[in-house]
Image (cartoon, rainbow, N blue to C red):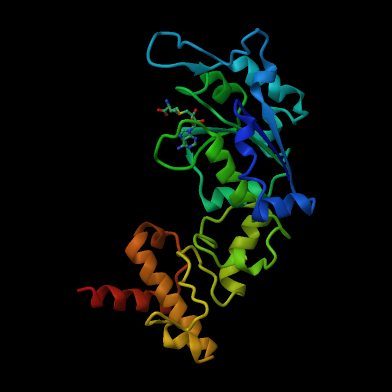
Amino acid sequence: MKADILTIFPGFFTGPLDHGITRRACELGLAKIEVHDLRRFTHDRHRTVDDRPFGGGEGMVLKPEPIFECLEPLGLASREQRLAGTAKQNVILLSAQGERFTQKVAAELAGLDRMVLICGRYEGVDERVADFLADRELSIGDYVLSGGELGAAVIIEAVMRLLPGAVGNEASTRQESFTGHREAGQGKAGELAENAAADSTCGSGGLLDYPHYTRPADFRGMPVPEVLLNGDHQEIRRWRREQALKKTLRNRPDLLEGAELGAEDAKILTRIRASKG
Ligand code: SAM
């Protein structure tokens, strides 16, 4: 997977991408990340990347020329091929107005050979970038950031950890929160996610993850739940599933709609709901 980041703040990425799994994926040759400074594609003395908005209004807008000129020499397939899926590449514009970035989207992106992330700034990016250059707009959440750089780092980290071989214990990425959701994405990572509920004892099936504990068994009078210490794996599996259902019902009831729920899950949910009165 090759990832290109287009930004006016290239220095921003020194740090966030140099740690953990993202670094490991690059060191193992599973991924390559290149950061491109948009100011290198300006033609004036002041290296201007922004201008006032047509029609008036607040703030400045990121100009289209540096973005088009930076992207064009990258040797991507045509936009038509990318949109048709004949090229496994995506040009992504980070935008608060974009489609929500989710684990499902991360799985789709992990099946690509290449993604380009365009980071906006100021009041946003000239709309012709969204209309004629980018394949999709992605938002990392319903809030407004000052720039797309944090979003790009979030997307890269979420995607890189899904690349086969990036995480030491691959099973751990199959049993995480949101994974195995009924709408799991296509492609390699999507298949991986979909298999999770079937082949893992604790695949989340689209629920939030179950709670994790480690030593000490009793920390300042806060004991680890007894069930985890008795070595009965069936009982542990049942308990974890119940906890995942409880937590999902409490924190993210919206996820239950798309989750892979069995008859046993339905019974547990009825019991939890009844106990809440
Ligand atoms: N005027 C825009 C609006 O109201 O939607 C906000 C522009 S924001 C200040 C500047 C840039 O930050 C955007 O072009 C985008 O690249 C990035 N950005 C802000 N919020 C974001 C989010 N939730 N997800 C992804 N990118 C975001």
Which residue is more in the foreground, 258 or 134?
134
Residue plotted at (71% across, 58% down): 166
Q: Is residue 15 above or below residue 71?
A: below
**Quarter where residue 268 is shown:** bottom left
Q: Position of residue 117 (x, y in %)?
A: 62, 34
Q: Position of residue 182 (x, y in %)?
A: 51, 60
**176 or 211: nearer the viewer:** 211
The answer to whether any part of residue 263 appears in the image is no
Residue 78 position by quadrant: top right
Q: Position of residue 198 (x, y in %)?
A: 59, 72
Quarter of the figure with the C terminus: bottom left
Is residue 168 depicted above or below 228 in this figure?
A: above
Q: Is residue 102 visible?
A: yes
Residue for point 74% across, 47% down: 31
Residue 100 in the image, given as x and y percentages of width and height: 47, 43
Left or right: where 236 falls relative to 13: left
